[in-house]
Image (spheres, rainbow, N blue to C red):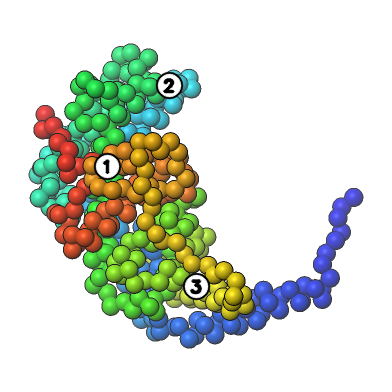
Amino acid sequence: MENQYAPHEDFVRLYDLYTGPQSIAADLAEQMVGATSANPLLVSTGSDLVLFPGGGASPIAESFRHSTRGFKEMTAVSHLGTTVAWLAEMHETGNPEWQHWASRLIDQANRTRELCNRDFVQKQIAVEAWREQEEKIARLLDYGCRTTSEFLQDCLADPSKLSFDNVREDFLEPRPGSQMAVPFNDVMVATFALTFLDIAYRTMNWIHSQSIDWQKIMVLIAGPSGRPTAGLTWATNNMCHLLWRASGKSLPPERLLIAAHLPGLEVDELSNKEMVEKLEAVYRGYWCKTRVTADIGAKMFEGFPAFVPNIDAAPIITSATKTLAEMPRLRDPDDRLTAISRLRLVMEDPRQLLSNSVAEFIIDELCVQDMDPSRVRIPGFTNVDFPAVS
């Protein structure tokens, strides 16, 4: 029998008095929106930062991912390690298409190697944060393409070599005596780190160039970042740490909200004034409504344990560590155990952004080195010698 239940209209009206679009909660939130309309609002999307200065002023923006120099070039090589692993999974699960894809990857890696030289990195990619490192970066990119091509050629000649044991022991983390000069794990760490060095350097410099009152700013991380399940907390979204360090650690954590379900905003959409004004109103309304709830909760339950955001440093792991539930702290650029454990964690833990593998370390290094990227110690790169381009 079909359930004919419906709540009584008097209960619905009582419910809506607090939660409805025309309600006590909405009224108070709107009051807060008006009181904070002159406050700056900083919105971070999956690829851009947009600052709404407040008082109706036009927004200004900075892109930090897909639309910037070097991102595709560096991440293309970062992905080679995982691409080989995907091919191994195809092979081990009986998908014959792995040979087709391996052949295509070999061909493209060999073609790409023709671009892996200092002139191309220096003049075509031309990333400011990589200045004076172009020769070594060219060697890194060439090495990544060459070793991937060579490993897959061996696998095509002898498909039994495309097992996960061999991927680990002959490619990612080669056994002693291997012909690989540098484990591919280091290539992945280095390329991730160099990519994020550029992102952090440009983004933090842009933030420093703005006149931001960090005690008044309203910060929203809006829309998806990476995987739909990722970046939903301070600990799993490196933009939180970046903004906190860019503020000189003065950004109150409670003024930063993460709202993956809110609509994002692309830089090229800023020319649509009407749409931008509507989005700003949505962002400000959401931020204020959320903060009103939190502020009232503190007043209602004073005397009971209070919520305090935890942004403490992550734990350190050792060779005795067998499992991880949270991201461990990378102690220095030569801490391979942690660097590669972080690579594993960002793939296994759906909460993590992939860039979390190196982000926090690079951000902190930039701050310690007074925003001089040439002095930043880069995991998998600074103290690693990549073979000359052949």
Q: Secondary structure at mark 1?
A: loop
Q: CA distance from mark 2 to mark 3?
A: 49 Å
Of the pair 256 and 224, the residue shown nearer to us: 256
Q: Amino acid at mark 1?
A: Asp
**Quadrant of the drawing holding the C terminus:** top left
Of the pair 362 and 48, the residue shown nearer to us: 362
Vertical comparison of 307 with 100: above or below: below
Asked which quadrant contains residue 128, the reply is: bottom left
Q: Amino acid at mark 3?
A: Trp
In this orientation, does residue 99 appear? no
Residue at (18, 63) in percent of width and height = 370
First in sequence, mark 2 or 3: give its number.
2
Q: Amino acid at mark 2?
A: His
Q: CA distance from mark 2 to mark 1?
A: 33 Å
- Residue 159 numbered tag: none
Q: How crowded is the residue under tag 3: few (<14 C-alpha within 10 Å), some, or many (20+)?
A: many
- Residue 287 numbered tag: 3
State yes or no: discs 2 and 3 in contact (Cβ < 8 Å). no
First in sequence, mark 1 or 3: give its number.
3
Image location (x, y in percent) of residue 24: 65, 81
Q: How crowded is the residue under tag 1: few (<14 C-alpha within 10 Å), some, or many (20+)?
A: few
Residue that label 2 marks: 91
Q: Secondary structure at mark 2?
A: helix
Residue that label 1 marks: 335
Of the pair 325 and 49, the residue shown nearer to us: 325
Depth-wise, is mark 2 or mark 3 nearer the camera?
3
Vertical comparison of 50 with 184: above or below: below
In this orientation, does residue 37 appear? yes
Image location (x, y in percent) of residue 285: 52, 75
